[in-house]
Amino acid sequence: MTKFIFLSAFLFCFIIINKNNLAQSNEVVQVSTPLEKIPAETTISINPQNPQNVVASFYNKNPKYPSITDFTYASFDGGKTWKEVPNNNPEKRIQGDDAVAFGSDGIVYHSYLSFFGSWDNNVRKQYSGIYVSSSTDGGLTWGIRSVVVDHINTSAPMEDKPYVVVDNSSSSPYKDNVYIAWTHFQKYGSKNPADSSQIYFSRSIDSGKSFSVPMRISETGGDCLDSSNTVEGAITAVSPDGNVYVVWAGPKGLVFTESKDGGKTFGRNKVIGFVYHGWDMEVPGIYRANGMPVTKVDLSNSKYRGTIYVNWADDRFGDPDVFVKYSRDGGRSWSNPIRVNDDKVDNGKYQFFTWMAVDPIDGSVNVIFYDRADYDSTETGLTLARSIDGGKTFVNYKINQPAFNCNPDIFFGDYTGIDAYNGEVIPIYMYFKNKNDLGIAAAIFHFKPGTQEQIK
């Protein structure tokens, strides 16, 4: 969690998708509690051992727990109801940029930043670190946190946007490895060209008890200004045979790298696409918005098994749209970008803050994004887009969240979340409850696996 703050048509694969953006059969439920203040940056994961067990997390403040900013939320009824779980917070650090991920064995991992005094040189102590905790009871209790990296008594370097992922492929020789990638700022906010941002990576081979020494996997970095020329959005994804993929965005565009030995070493970086006008985009009513990439792999037994998908947003057609591209050959070649949202091109409407999940059972590609196609000014709704043909076409479903107006004075976070399992799809997101406060809600979709048919 950082400091608040055209391609001609022949290169673009424009797909006409079914116009289905009407009120759909989905249940919206509240996840945050009334006490929580300005919660943001959501993450969610479904337990493959028990799909009724869902774990979520997001940054927030709760006056009931004045020294705690580390919260997780557990559900045992498929996301209909949630239990707030406040976790221990040694040294009363600020915690954020949460990510949660279940392993195939039912262990859930929670990665997060843990920092203090990062922008205040007058404090006695400064910290900047990344930690991972795990839970074996579906998120009700959490074990001792493991250190991925920690800097004590210094504001530099600074770590940012870690995202934990587990190798859940039954055919992988590295099954159950835990991976995490993030942005490493040599000196956050520095305008000095000598200071750079880089992508770092670490792994655990003992169920998150310990992590390897962080290593740099970006060959070319970016600046430290936390904008489009900074390298960010690094998320790990794992193939059925255990290959580890990481994609991020920066001044060169979308950059891809691969490990064939379980995260010990990585190959050369490869530019696989472009984020037009950069990942840091202007959206009216939003403090800041980004189009950073999200990377996932199909682990299902569908005919698209092993496909790598990358999801991002950019404004190549005049206003922000949501895109997906895919590789069926392990990243050697890539499709043209597929426009996911189905409104008219260059209509001045905004789609932003996208996230993606690939169902490990039916192979469907499910994308959430904020959507202003039906609204004016800063009024905002949400859409789920779903593909059952390997990302070639998408059907849009309106999430039954009442539209809300946005306030640029309130930090809206940097991302949303979504997970999918055997036709169950659960996006989780921020919304404005009123002008000055946010809430967190989840939308529960039930699809007949491998189809666009909703089960009521």
Image (tube, rainbow, N blue to C red):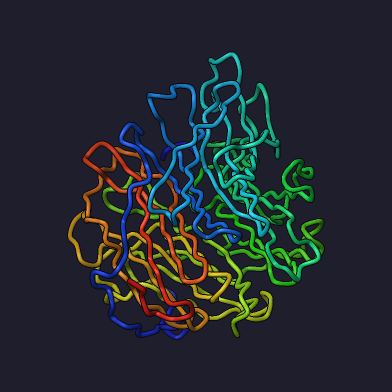
x, y percent for residue 193: 61, 43
x, y percent for residue 81: 39, 48
Residue at (56% x, 76% y) in the render: 326
Residue at (75% x, 41% y) in the render: 209
Q: Is residue 196 visible?
A: no
Q: Is residue 47 visible?
A: yes
Of the 4 image quadrants, the one containing the C terminus is: bottom left
Q: In the rendered view, would you say 363 is above or below 129?
A: below
Instruction: Classify residue 305 as left or right of residue 243.
Output: left
Between 161 and 195, the one nearer to me in the picture: 161
Between 318 and 30, the one nearer to me in the picture: 30
Farthest left residue in view: 376
x, y percent for residue 304: 59, 82
* Quadrant in which residue 165 is drawn: bottom right
Residue at (53% x, 61% y) in the render: 294
Q: In the rendered view, would you say 284 is above or below 366?
A: above
x, y percent for residue 15: 39, 84
Counting the numbered discs, the total is 0
Between 293 and 112, the one nearer to me in the picture: 112
* Quadrant in which residue 243 is drawn: bottom right
* Quadrant in which residue 217 is drawn: bottom right
Q: In the rendered view, would you say 228 is above or below 261?
A: above
Residue at (53% x, 33% y) in the render: 95
